[in-house]
Image (tube, rainbow, N blue to C red):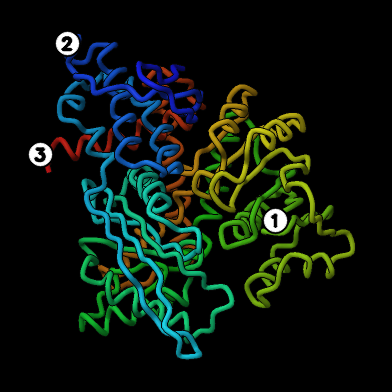
Amino acid sequence: MRKFTGSGHSAALPIGPVRGTCPVAGPASPNAEGKGGAMDVTEHVESVYAELRRRDPGESEFHQAAAEVLHDLEPALRKHPEYVDARIVERLCEPERQLVFRVPWTDDRGDVRVNRGFRVEFSSALGPYKGGLRFHPTVDLGTVKFLGFEQIFKNALTGMALGGGKGGADFDPKGKSDGEIMRFCQSFMTELHRSLGEHTDVPAGDIGVGGREIGYLFGQYKRITNRHEAGVLTGKSVAWGGSHVRTEATGYGVVYFLQEMLATRGRSLEGRRVVVSGSGNVAVYAVEKASALGATVLACSDSVGYLVDDDGIDPELLKEIREVRGQRLPAYAEARPNARFVESGSVFDVPCDVALPCATQNELNREHALTLVKNEVFAVAEGANMPCTAEAIEAFREAGVLFGPGKAANAGGVATSALEMQQNASRETWTFERTEDRLATVMRDVHERCRATAESYGGASHDYVFGANIAGFLRAAEAMMAQGVV
């Protein structure tokens, strides 16, 4: 597939499934050679990317996410030249609203602390802005924009009425007391609440934001607005408006998507060796579901090393260690005779049939990918958001490895958030079984949407990156065209 080319000075950046450099070209008229012509579409996409880099310097993760999508859009733009004329791509790359605000709070000693909060409301073409809040010291505007941009396509792929957004703060919950976290969440929501609403913007959790934080955020929203607007936040406790399966949804969903990919090759998870990176919420429940479907999950990881259990990781012990005791993975190794914790190297050094990167962005690079390929991995599905670098994805493609991108494979979390919103709207609570069945159906639909779109737009049916990017774009673009220039 094509790499971006053009005039001007070059800026190295991985581009889509086949990555290269993207020279910063000057503005090009979309009608340089007639509407929808091959050359003008190419130049149009290049100029959009060049302008994005110019206007948002230093936001490398946002550039990476945008480049992957833009790389794949040319077939759709040639088929729909009206999208070029309406500047749909430019409008999708520019958030509808970007909020940056101060979050002052007091710690347990009474000292005043100050953090920075963010909410990027990227696209409301398909529904209210929907996307999580991330509390982590590395969070900045570029991080939130990359996550929000991905969320547009992820939410579109679910087939549900959800726009795309993301938010967070450079606040680190680790080492903080419950009181400190409560005071931070209350201050954060005091500023953010005016932009939220069940028909406007509906946040959820992400890294550093779990049920405790969602509870504090919702309590402050209710206190300020005097409304028990249950649908304004998802990821709530089942006891007060949350949904069954929301905790498990992203991890379960990536395994459901993996199942569908494997089925296209006549394979299943039964007896497969699986490696999962991370040991947070997504990883834990990916381990649980893969194990339940007959796989042997050999390894998972945390920030200081990785755990290997030759007998297969015990999901119940893993949940006990991580969720109940709040301990790190060495505690698991101490409890199992055939388990060991390794402090050097990478979890992706462990030979496996399937790899599920479920930790954080850009954790799996080309070197890791080549190691996995050498060890005969045949499927990779992203449980985290953009955990594979551009070069890693290229290596998997060259080797013919089945690859499920995060915007498709980890859509289970937001899909179940939408199911939570449905239950809130009707004042219902569904059973675990009913909700999980709906989740499985959504993930099958996401897989089929990606597969069919890839095939119909001239790619291989197993090119899920290509299919996901075009399918998500087309759904958003159709809504944007119908709604006018807004």
Q: Residue at x 44, y 17 (%)?
A: 2
Q: Amino acid at mark 3?
A: Gly
Q: Amino acid at mark 2?
A: Gly
Q: CA distance from mark 3 to mark 1?
A: 47 Å
480 versus 236 height, above or below: above
Tell me where residue 166 appears, x and y as whole percent. 36, 56
**Position of residue 343 in the picture relative to residue 287 (left or right):** right
Mark in the foreground, 3 or 2: 2
Q: Residue at x 51, y 27 (%)?
A: 462
- Please name the residue that numbered disc 1 is placed on: 301
**Position of residue 59 in the picture relative to residue 95 (left or right):** right
Q: Furthest residue to the front?
A: 9
User: Which is nearer the eye, 246 or 305?
Assistant: 305
User: Which is nearer the eye, 95 or 109?
Assistant: 109
Badge 2 density bin: few <14, some 14–19, many ≥20, Cα 10 Å: few
Q: Amino acid at mark 1?
A: Ser
- Give yes or no for contact between labels 3 and 1 (Cβ–Cβ under 8 Å): no
